Image (cartoon, grey):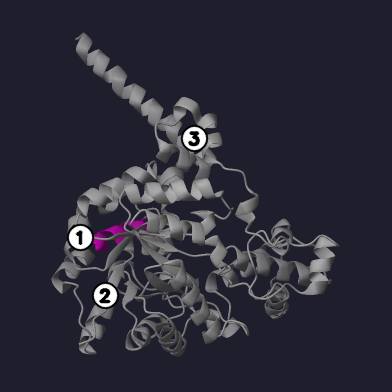
Amino acid sequence: MPKIALTETVLRDANQSLVATRMHFADFADVLPLLDQAGFYSLECWGGATFDSCLRYLDEDPWERLRKIRAACPNSKLQMLLRGQNLLGYKHYPDDVVRLFVKKSIENGIDIIRIFDALNDLRNIEVAVDETIQNGAHASGTLCFTTSPVHDLDAFAKLAKQMESMGVHSICIKDMAGIMGPKEAFDLVSAIKQSVKLPVVVHTHSTTGLGFMTLLKAAEAGADVLDTAISSFSGGTSQPATETMAYTLRQMGFDLDVDSKKLKQINDFFKPSLAKFLADGTLNPVVMGTSTDALVYQIPGGMLSNLVAQLTAQNKLDQLDAVLEETPRVRADLGYPPLVTPMSQMVGAQAAANVLAGERYKNISKEIRSYVRGEYGRTPVPVNADLQKKILGDEQPITCRFADLLSPGVEAARAELGSRASCDEDVLSYIAFPPQAEAYFAKREAKKRAVVRYTIERVDK
Ligand code: CO
């Protein structure tokens, strides 16, 4: 029987996609021993938006959260999502910051780092991949799935091959918008399996309703690991359900390690949690449904709702069709970037600007200017020459990695923080999200003082 494994995403992507990453550690602490024993390939539990959310909304130290998960799950591989040279954000960080971040993530308990770049520019993942390998962890080289005239099977297979020669331990196909269909998944997994000798992991979302079919065909093509979410936190903008996928795969003759009884207990644990998020408004039931507009327009659902919101705010919703026709033209002008954050927002906003101004590229955003300057990385094909000329004049776009132009950042941040940072992890929190980290440090200090005062008062008595 062919063997296949599941990665459980409830702690990271399901949490991020359904409830805006608002799960506290206390919300899932008690289920960690069960998750640890359920037979998953890995638990995706950190990175992505969890780090920002811990500091910004949850009053938690993200590093401490990771150490607690590590302690409660001694038998599991803990996995995180990392945006290559952007780490957990959107700007490019210098290499010393990327290396220290990766090293500390592994030291604090991460086993598998899924590393991607929004443009699939492998120069933007190579430092993070190298540091992951040097620290003895598993580097999962990740391809952002997209469709365009230049993103064919050959192009993706070639990228997989290049990642294999960088030393990654697995290849992940990341369909962040849930637009990869079953046939595309079957063909892509088959092509990558032919091109490399590494395990292939498939990540998608249920947004458009394709998810289950896509994962099943991926499995039939030989995928080794699939991402799923425990059923109460599955569906809609989250992943397909773990239990349903396990049931289906077993029926189709696959051999899986997950323990169905434990899955039921895990799901029973999360059911009231889901009800709580629904009751307090954190979870909008709309995101749990199936939204097929993305299939009609061939753009991610999130991008479509952004465009609708943007046009509604300007009282220009009647221009939606014109903007949706302009969107693929802007994307072509920009060299077919995958429509993932932040590119999806940038392309959508530029298409809207082109239509609303009645003139193409009359107004050009700061982000599009830096993109054309080459600061996001190498575009899949060159930017339209006229557009480049219009934005840069005679200036040439950079051809090196943007990070090559950045000065080291760790020492400078350490000096800025002084005694407010108690360890390298603090310095990294500050580099990643400065105001949020500073606010968190101040609160932590105040709490510490309150404890000291309380202790002294007790001693006085
Ligand atoms: Co995702």
Residue 382 in view (yes/no)? yes
Q: Is residue 458 magenta?
A: no
Mark sitting earlier along the chain (3/1): 1
Q: How many C-alpha atoms fall within 10 Å of the one at disc 2: few (<14), some, or many (≥20)?
A: many
Task: Provide the residue designation for mark 3.
Answer: 438
In the rendering, at what x and y percent does residue 175 appear? 47, 74
The label on residue 36 is: 1
View extreme (left): residue = 261
Q: Which residue is rendered at x = 77% and y = 72% of the image?
A: 355
Secondary structure found at label 3: helix
Q: Marks 1 and 2: CB-CB under 8 Å?
A: no
Residue type, numbered disc 2: Ala
Residue at the (22%, 9%) spot, across then down: 460
Q: Is 277 inside the magenta-drawn segment?
A: yes
Residue type for callout 3: Glu
The quarter of the rendered structure image containing the N terminus is bottom left
Q: Mark 3 and mark 1: span between their CA atoms?
A: 33 Å
Whether the residue carrying mark 1 lies under 8 Å from ligand 1 is answered with no
10 Å crowding of disc 1: few (<14), some (14-19), many (20+) = many
Q: Picture coordinates of residue 344 (x, y %)?
A: 61, 68
| Quadrant position of the C terminus in the picture | top left
